[in-house]
Each structure stands twice: as C-alpha cells, then as structure tokens.
Image (tube, rainbow, N blue to C red):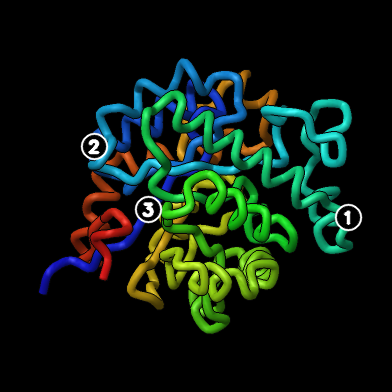
Amino acid sequence: MPPVPFILIADDYALTAGVSRAICDLLGKGRLSGTGVMTNQPGWPSLAPALQPFFNKRDIGLHLTLTLGAPLGEMPNLAPAGVLPKLGPLLSGSLTGQLSRVEMTQEFMRQMGAFQEHTGRLPDFIDGHQHVHVLPIVRSALFEAIERYKPDWRPWLRVPADHLGAILARGTTVGKALFIALLAQGFASSANKRGFPVNDSFSGVSDFKADGGFAHDFRRYLLVSGKHHLVMCHPGHSDAALAALDPVTKARDEEFAFFNSDAFEALMVSMNMRVARFGETA
C-alpha cells in the first residue's frame, strides 16, 4: 500500500532570519510541504529570494498577520499608533463587532501585494498568524480581499479545526484545539461556497513547552481524520531577535531538531505516511 500523504506546513517564515533559515533547510530536505510567509515583517524583502528554489515544488503561502509588528498601511481602527494589537484585543473586537472589515480588507491586499512584489507570484495558500483569518469579520475581509485582488484566484485556505472525536483521540493540547475549532465554526462552509479549496482535518496545536515531548505529540498529530489532513508546525533557530518578538523560542529549536532527524524519517516509514503538497492529497 502506498504511503498516505499529509500536508505539513511551517508557520512564520520571515519572522526572523533564524526561523526562516531553519524552514528553508527543512524545505530543501523535503521534510515540509511548505511554509506561510509574514510579509509585514521588516525582514521579508531580504528573505524572499531564499524561497525561489521551492516555487512549484513546495506550497509557499501567505501567513496573514494582524497581531505582530506594524501594518503595511494606515489602520486607524485596529492600529492607531501604527502597531498591531495582541490577539486578545483583536479577538474581543471581532466577537463584539468593533473591527473595520474595510480596513482589514485593505491591509490583507497590501500583504498579498508584498508577497507578489518580492516573489513575482501569488501565494499557493493563505492562513493567519494565530489563526486570525477565521475570526468573525476578519474572515469576511479575507474573502473580499482575495476576490478583489484577483477575481479568479482561488488559493487553498487553512481551516484550523477538526472533528471533536479526532481532537479528543489525539489528546494533545485538547482545550486549546477545541477553542480554536470553535472560533473556526462555519469558516470551511463559507470558503467552499466561494470556491476555495480547504483542508478537511487539522492538527498541530501545541502548548509550546520545550520539554522533549514534541516527537511524541507529533505522532499523535498524524491520527488522520480526513483526506486533506493538515499539520501545522513552528520549526526555527531561536536567538535574541526571536525572543524580542515572540515567546515561542526553544520549542522551535526542538521542532527543527525533530524534523531534521533520522527519527522523523523513521516515523514516516513506520506509519506509512509521507509529506505532500495540498494538491497531492486525495
């Protein structure tokens, strides 16, 4: 029986040079299906050329960002001082209807433009940093931004949710996974109605504890419940630049070490699975 394909996407390309270098290393070794890019980060223009060898070989997507750094244009409602908020205020504004859909649509189009400007192509997929793309109001802005940017463009979109039974069966960071799935309710059906391909099962939600347990958790992430199973991950090389931006540091080193190891390859063989692009899953 041929190996079962699944999609393994590394988040946060362009967050720092160390994170980006680690992701490129794994892409080159065929250990990842692809990566999502943060085009609002200052390092993106200089880090973009390193992705050139992977176009049409890996899925290179846009990791929309509303909770880290600065927007690429004025956002007087969300970022009046020119700095994007933390997740908490964004989530609150989303659930209480206080976000500006027009403002976010414009910012998403700017981030799409920054991707195309520095790669010469459109993203293969779109998702969101901290899954913001599925929030109420934000998801509407996402659909509108894509359709306005290029009306016939239909990248695949990440659905950060799975069935209750699958989440419970994996038993990893269950509360957080259920909360994200709750926020994502209705996103898949809305995307499908607009003609966007989506993954039909999802895992990889982590507590980011660098305690040596990632390999064990990853095996649980591969308990597949759909034909387009997507696993998110966050490999990287931690350093002072990363620590200044993000609390997830040493856990990224642990993930990189695992994906770069013979143990990862052995796991693929033992579970009869293989890393694949979205279009290679059936």
Q: Earlier in the sequence, mark 2 or mark 1?
A: 2
Q: Quadrant of the C terminus?
A: bottom left
Report the number of discs.
3
Which-is-in-front pick, marks 1 and 3? 1
- Label 3 SS: strand
Compared to 279, does 65 lie above or below?
above
Residue at the top extreme of this rendering? 46
Separation (CA) of disc 2 from disc 3: 13 Å
Reading the image, the residue beneath label 2 is 29
Q: Nearer the viewer, residue 221 or 17?
A: 17
Compared to 239, does 195 lie above or below?
below
Reading the image, the residue beneath label 3 is 8
Q: Name the amino acid type tagged 1.
A: Gln
Q: Name the amino acid type tagged 3.
A: Leu
| Residue 274 coordinates in the image, percent (x, y) | 23, 58
Circles 2, 1 touching at the beta carbon (< 8 Å): no
- Characterize the local packing of mark 3: few (<14), some (14-19) or many (20 or more) Cα atoms within 10 angstroms: many
Reading the image, the residue beneath label 1 is 98
| Residue 7 coordinates in the image, percent (x, y) | 35, 57
